Amino acid sequence: MRREYIRSTLLMAASIAIGVMAWSGHVTLLPVAMGFPILWSLSRTRLLAALVSAGYFLAASRGLPQGVAAFYSSNIWPGLLLWFCASMSFVIVHAIFWTKKAGTRPFRYLLAAVIMAIPPFGITGWAHPVTAAGVLFPGWGWWGLGFMTAGLAGLVTRFWPAVAIALTGFWLWSAAFWTDPKLAEAWRGVDLQLGVSLGRDAGLQRQRDMIATVRGVASDGALYVVLPESALGFWTPTVERLWTGILRDGNATVIAGALLLDARGYDNVLVAIDRKGSHILYRERMPVPGSMWQPWRSWLGESGGARADFFANPVVSIGTSRAAPLICYEQLIVWPILQSMLHDPDFVVAVGNGWWTEGTSIVAIQRATTTAWAKLFAKPLVIAFNT
């Protein structure tokens, strides 16, 4: 009994350590997440599998309580509650599909992995081990994703040591020659440090400051300038006239985050502005659950909250190219990027507004996961964040 207790404690401790290391914000450490399926398969009871899953997920998403507290300007308790609730889908799925039968374990783990990658459970499908595919198999595309999936299945069999050694070999080889994704030609992503004021300061001076920033970048030869999520605030006719008037005499195209408001709620969007005018380029498929996406409002007959367009506009046309846009939360989950890659875009555009994540690794994790996916499919990457 004592030996079993020690073994269970070690498995739970290891799952926490793996969650912390893999999701530290360093892209080359993402393959550490491959340790989770091993620990899940080594669990001897369903309860222990649930505890291992909880340890991994809670450790991986450890920045959430602090971030929620900053977002709502409240104490830590709402964040802790959301942290716990978000972990439940991951824990429940992996507990249900755990089995003692070694013969069916790979199939059951893969089923759990697929469920956690697509809605509805995929809505909180953070820290998915398959994200490491881009580190192990950069440039392999769908073949790399297939090999990674097969590798994860192999890690829950009795042959897991051999599979782990093989995958570690790919990891070390990739890390030794690692380079970040190249930047799309003539594109510039602008990182800002405007904190909570971005998107909330609707004054004319803020818009003028943003325009001056764009002009400075465009004067350096950029034809496409990407600004972070919510950079333009609420997209109104007044703001539209200001920006289109300023850009009418230039060659630059601005891609910027904005909020499009109506009587029922709002859309978190990317707007494209050039000398010909402006248009809504992209509507976010998956806003942040809870703080932005609040589906219960419509159930109660209330308005408000951001709309989720789950599987809409996976790619957008910009000039003669096609881009896969990812806004903030979409960078943490699996299906938006894979849906976009089904359409073979020319590059990836990732924007975010992470002022509320100060003191956490959330923005670093977003950058790492987006980088890994771009490397897997060998796509140029443009990133713009506000912190």
Image: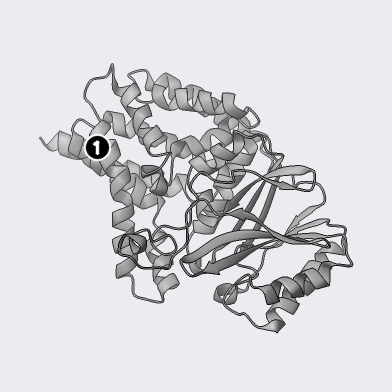
Looking at the image, which is closer to me, 275 or 345? 275
Residue 266 in the image: state x and y as whole percent.
51, 65
Q: Residues within 10 Å of mark 1 (few under 14, many from 20)?
A: many
Could you tell me which residue is drawn at 52 percent across and 68 percent down? 262
Could you tell me which residue is drawn at 54 percent across and 58 percent down? 363
Residue 142 in the image: state x and y as whole percent.
58, 27
Indicate left or right for 280 with 355 as reference: right
Image quadrant holding the C terminus, namely bottom right
Give the image quarter of residue 157. Answer: top left
Indicate left or right for 234 with 246 as reference: left
Looking at the image, which is closer to me, 186 or 25? 186
Could you tell me which residue is drawn at 47 percent across and 66 percent down? 265
Could you tell me which residue is drawn at 18 percent across and 33 percent down? 45
Indicate left or right for 182 with 215 as reference: left
Residue 254 in the image: state x and y as whole percent.
75, 61
Coloration mode = one colour
Looking at the image, which is closer to me, 69 or 203? 203
The amino acid type of the residue labelled 1 equals Ala
Does residue 379 show up? Answer: yes
Q: How many marks?
A: 1
- In the depicted structure, whether residue 312 falls above or below residue 133: below
- In the depicted structure, whether residue 379 falls above or below residue 143: below
Secondary structure found at label 1: helix
Looking at the image, which is closer to me, 374 or 179? 374
Q: Residue furthest left?
A: 1
Residue 231 in the image: state x and y as whole percent.
64, 68
Image quadrant holding the N terminus, namely top left
Residue beneath label 1, please? 95
Does residue 12 show up? Answer: no
